Structure formats: C-alpha cells, structure tokens
Image (cartoon, helix red, strand yellow):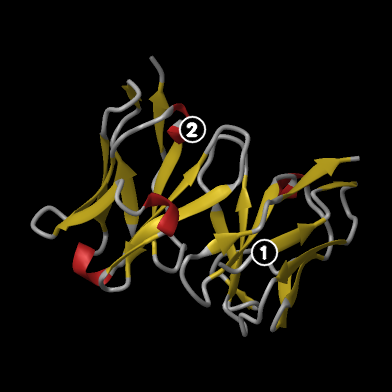
Amino acid sequence: DIQMTQSPSTLSASVGDRVTITCRASQTISSWLAWLQQKPGKAPKLLVYKASSLQSGVPSRFSGSGSGTEFTLTISSLQPDDFATYYCQQYNSYPWTFGQGTKVEIK
Amino acid sequence: QVQLVQSGAEVKKPGASVKVSCKVSGHTLTEVSMHWVRQAPGKGLEWMGGFDPERVYAQKFQGRVTMTEDTSTDTGYMELSSLRSEDTAVYYCATDALDYWGQGTLVTVSS
C-alpha cells in the first residue's frame, strides 16, 4: 500500500497568512493526488484533483502543486472559513490511501 | 448536480451486520462509480472499496464487506458483517472523483 504522510499535523495561523501543507507519498503516484477539506461533523469537500487542478467553485486562494512523491497545498491568504482539517489522497493505485490530516487552527 | 443521500444512523451489537444505503439523484447510478470511505471518531479517512467498474475492496475489509448497486432505484449499498467496536465510525459514500459525498451514516457498535 502507498503511505501518504502529511506535515504538519497541526498548524496555527492567522487570517491573512499564507499557509502551506505538504504531503509525501511512499512511492511515485505521478499526479494522481487530491486535496480535501473537512469541517467538524461534515463530509469532506474536494478542493484540488490531479495535484494542481482546482475543483469548480473552490476559491482561487487554494492551489496545489507537485508530482511524483512530493505535493503541496497552499492557501495564499487564510480566511475565517478555511479553519478546518485538510487531507491528501492518492488515487494512483488501489487501495486508495489518505494522509493523516492537517488541522489548521486559529492562532 | 449530483446528490448522494444516505440512510440513517444505526446501532448494532458486536457480531451483527449493518447495511448502509446511498441514493443517487441528479445522475443515474450507471453514470457514477460509487466508493465508500469511513471515519472513526476523531480519526482520519479510510477508503473501504468501490466500483471501477468492477468491485474493488481494501484488503482490510475483504470477506466482511459487500458493496452492491440497484440501478433500478439508483441506490448503492455497503454491508459490513461481523461488526466489532472498532467499526464504530461515520460511513460515507462518494463518487469516484470524490467530488460528491453523502452526508455520512454513523454506525455505532456496542453491546
């Protein structure tokens, strides 16, 4: 199975900050990576697919980059609505696997 | 616009089975490939299996999980048997692109 490792596990930031979350795959997954956002008690929401393609309706302050084994999700200017947990997910091969999550908290 | 609506919360005893449903609207079930993901309380997301287009299951659940589809009602089902306390989780259905999700179904396994 492909292991997905996110860092950091928790991130404290202020509104307006630039935030970067990293995801590393245990083997190459090309660009078959998605980023999802989850708020408490809610289903996850797709933000980015194929490593860098922004899902329709997602604000442009979100961006994804990377390929192979190293990926990043960047929020250019953190907004109050962005405080949530973020997961990366690989769909290069089965079983699909998720990172452990990064919780973005208010500083 | 695709919508996925899941069945309600369940409480089961250890050793029992649970069957969660997920009804598709806005598209037909033949137009989407349904997958299932679960999340234990306070934990991360765990993929269980789905259709691609044949069934594919995570090794961890092989022999205990059965995913089926009823195209006449555009409803997908996930049945998990031999339940144990560690199976207490919110179970989600989602399209294969993970762009649409059900609202989640809490399954509690307790004696």
Q: Position of residue B111 (x, y in %)?
A: 38, 14
Left or right: where does residue B68 sit relative to residue A85?
left
Q: Who is closer to the viewer here, A12 or A1?
A: A1
Question: At x 34% / y 61%, what residue is drawn?
Answer: B50
The answer to whether marks 2 and 1 mark residues whose Cβ atoms lie closer than 8 Å is no
Find residue B101 and report its horizontal and vertical position in percent.
Answer: 42, 53
Q: Mark 1 = which residue?
A: A4
User: A91 or B59: which is nearer to us?
Assistant: B59
Quadrant where the C terminus of chain A sits is: top right
Residue A58, position as x, y percentages in the image? 61, 64
Q: How many marks?
A: 2
Q: Is residue B28 visible?
A: no
Secondary structure of the residue carrying tag 1 is: strand
Q: Name the chain letter of the residue that bears numbered label 2.
A: B
| Residue lying at 90% horizontally and 47% vertically, measured from the top left | A14
Task: Identify the secondary structure beneath mark 2.
Answer: helix
Residue at point 63%, 53% (across, down) = A37
Picture quadrant where residue A66 is located: bottom right
| Residue A10 visible in this rendered orientation of the protein | yes
Kindly report the distance in space between the C-alpha atoms of the residues bearing marks 2 and 1: 22 Å
Q: Residues within 10 Å of mark 2 (few under 14, many from 20)?
A: few
Quarter-of-image position of residue B110: top left
| Residue at image point 35% right, 24% down | B14
Hey, which residue is sitting farthest left in the picture?
B72
Q: Residues within 10 Å of mark 1 (few under 14, many from 20)?
A: many
Query: Which residue carries the number 2 mark?
Result: B86
Amino acid type of the residue tagged 2 in the rendering: Glu
Residue B108 vs B36, above or below: the answer is above
Q: Where is residue A11 shown, x and y percent of the image?
A: 85, 48
Chain letter for the residue marked with disc 1 in the picture: A
